Amino acid sequence: METQHDIGIVVLTNDIDKTHEGYRPDKISYMRLEATAIEYHWMMENSIHPCVIISGGRIRSGPTLAEVLEHTAVTDFNITRSDIFKEEKSLNTVENAIFSIEELARRNINNCYIITNDFQLPRAMDCFRLYGPKKHIHIQGFSAEYIITKRHPERTEEIDSFLSKKDTIRRYEHNRKHRIIMNIPLIGPLLLRYGVRVQMALLGERPQEKVGDD
């Protein structure tokens, strides 16, 4: 019999790095996983039993993003393996939402916390809120920066410095384009009717783009 979980924490992956010891989450994914662990352990200490859905497919040869982050969640952050579910089909934020919502619905979980970064959070919330209500799932979103610095205020400067780098600014601009498109009247209903291909076409996305931030 499967364990009944009270809430689902969905962590959106970004990328992985190949090292001489094998594959590891990149720094952005690791930050999101650290924030997920903080929330997971706080909930467990307060008699709330969460599951962690790690959302990310295979973007190149090698393991899926979800597979690599699952290993790190267990070894680095002491998240119980039986509380982790891998969503290994998604290749972008739209698919993160679609397949994670399906996994939550299959497990009769009606509450969802999304954990990503500030620059992606509005986009992720737009995507999840398109699909979540259809399955009667309540969506909330939290940034990894907020969770970590709330627990460890002394790390604020370190995190701010990392997230101000040029590549992060590029990611922010990509997500800002998404918000502009989503605010056009009737776009939401159009996406619900015609699905993922329409949204990717509107945003100029390609199905094989990097997971999470694209």
Image: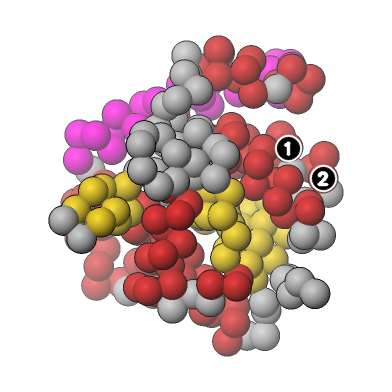
Q: Residues within 10 Å of mark 2 (few under 14, many from 20)?
A: some
What's the CA distance linking mark 1 and mark 2? 7 Å
Q: Residues within 10 Å of mark 1 (few under 14, many from 20)?
A: many
**Residue 36 appearing in the image:** yes
Residue 189 found in image quarter: top right
Q: Are marks 1 and 2 in contact (CB under 8 Å)?
A: yes
Is the residue 8 above or below the residue 193 in the image?
Answer: below
Judged from the image, the secondary structure of the residue bearing numbered disc 1 is: helix
| Residue type of the residue flagged with mark 2 | Lys
Q: In the picture, which quadrant includes the N terminus?
A: bottom right
Q: Nearer the viewer, residue 204 or 95?
A: 95
The secondary structure that dominates the magenta segment is helix
Give the residue number, with chain letter if any, for mark 2.
Answer: 135
Is the residue 41 above or below the residue 136 in the image?
Answer: below
The reply to whether the magenta stretch includes residue 95 is: no
Q: Which residues are magenta?
A: 165-190
Left or right: where does residue 166 sit relative to residue 172?
left
Q: In the picture, which quadrant includes the C terminus?
A: top left
Left or right: where does residue 51 sit relative to residue 116?
right
Judged from the image, the secondary structure of the residue bearing numbered disc 2 is: helix
Left or right: where does residue 7 sit relative to residue 41?
right
Residue 84 found in image quarter: bottom right
Direction front: furthest residue: 62
**Residue 144 appearing in the image:** no
Residue 76: x, y in percent? 35, 73
The reply to whether the magenta stretch includes residue 166 is: yes
Give the residue number, with chain letter if any, for mark 1.
Answer: 131
